[in-house]
Image (cartoon, rainbow, N blue to C red):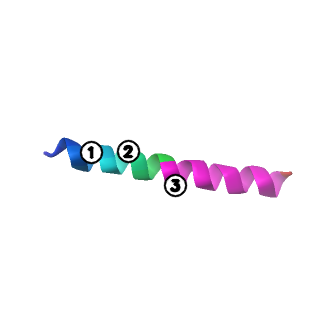
């Protein structure tokens, strides 16, 4: 199990999550 792979997964999830949250916030407003 590579730590780099785990870090990449976490980073990608954070980016995608924040992007989707941002779009939802803009759309709601």
Do tag 2 and tag 1 residues touch (Cβ < 8 Å)? yes
Q: Name the quadrant containing residue 23.
A: bottom right
In the image: residue 13, left or right of residue 28: left
Q: Magenta segment, which residues?
A: 15-28
Mark number, residue 28? none
Residue plotted at (44% across, 50% down): 13
Residues under labels 2 and 1: Cα distance?
A: 6 Å
Q: Which residue is mark 1?
A: 6
In the image: residue 4, left or right of residue 8: left
Residue plotted at (48% across, 46% down): 14
- Horizontal and vertical percent position of residue 11: 40, 47
Count residues near mark 2 (Cα–Cα under 10 Å), then give few for <14, some for 14-19, many for 20+: few
What is the secondary structure assignment of the residue under circle 1? helix
Q: Which residue is mark 2?
A: 10
What is the secondary structure assignment of the residue under circle 2? helix
Question: Toward the viewer: 20 or 15?
Answer: 15
Residues under labels 3 and 1: Cα distance?
A: 15 Å
Residue farthest toward the right in the current orientation of the protein: 29
Q: Which residue is mark 3?
A: 16
Nearest to N terminus: mark 3 or mark 2:
2
What is the secondary structure assignment of the residue under circle 3? helix
- Horizontal and vertical percent position of residue 26: 78, 54
Q: Name the quadrant containing residue 6.
A: top left
């Amino acid at each position: 199990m590579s730590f780099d792979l785990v870090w990449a997964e976490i980073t990608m999830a954070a980016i995608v999550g924040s992007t989707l949250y941002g779009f939802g916030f803009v759309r709601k407003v």
